[in-house]
Image (cartoon, rainbow, N blue to C red):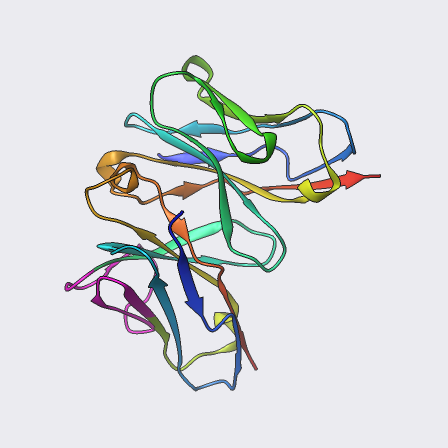
Amino acid sequence: GAVVSQHPSWVICKSGTSVKIECRSLDFQATTMFWYRQFPKQSLMLMATSNEGSKATYEQGVEKDKFLINHASLTLSTLTVTSAHPEDSSFYICSAKGGTSGTLNTGELFFGEGSRLTVL
Amino acid sequence: AQSVTQPDIHITVSEGASLELRCNYSYGATPYLFWYVQSPGQGLQLLLKYFSGDTLVQGIKGFEAEFKRSQSSFNLRKPSVHWSDAAEYFCAVGSYNQGGKLIFGQGTELSVKP
């Protein structure tokens, strides 16, 4: 099946620094990628939808300037947490949706393994 | 409002016993329904999905789920649980018009007793 890779798997940073998380589709071209955030023992909350070559669409309540999303190619989307603070510590998961062939246009997503961010 | 409810936060079953995890949804459009499993510290793995057709869906690892439109439910079942099934299970709903955007339930943590 399709593979989505996230990097890094975990990162620890100091408060005030910025952290970049990558999401790559390894064996298919992802026209759309989604970024989710998961707090401990909680469900996944959609943060934003990232479309290749255009600006991301953020969900209500998500700060665009805080969580910068770039989808520069059909296989890579990045999430940058700017000026990170302890409350940004979380598990960030991306998912990717392919093009119009196969089953990926019918809502099926492939998820990355997630990136755990800890801000000290 | 669109939502997914998993009424059971935590379930414990004995190994070899049957399992049913509940999922109810509220969704305006024709729903696509999914069950995902997450092991601690890991990403999500798709167990099964329902788009249309036969309302009883077979998935991986011996799981199945039944879509009941009248009850707005998509419960996950397994006839005999294995210790390796212990994990967090998420029900999710989306639609073609939403282009892959999913709404997730709160999750059900499954523990398996030896």
Question: Closer to the camera, B59 or B71?
Answer: B59
Task: Identify which residue is drawn at 21% across, 54% down.
Answer: A31
Q: Give the farthest residue toward the left.
A: A53
Numbered range of the magenta stretch: A52-78
Task: Identify which residue is drawn at 51% across, 49% down.
Answer: A43
Judged left or right of residue B84, residue A51 is left
Give the image location of residue A84, x and y in percent.
Answer: 44, 79
Give the image location of residue B27, x and y in percent.
Answer: 35, 29
Task: Identify which residue is drawn at 63% across, 56% down.
Answer: B40
**In the picture shown, does residue B11 fall above or below B42?**
above
Judged left or right of residue B40, residue B68 is left
Q: Is residue B25 magenta?
A: no
Give the image location of residue B24, x and y in percent.
Answer: 49, 27
Task: Identify which residue is drawn at 29% across, 66% down.
Answer: A77
Question: Closer to the camera, A55 or B3?
Answer: A55
Q: Is residue A63 magenta?
A: yes
Q: Give the farthest residue toward the right.
A: B114
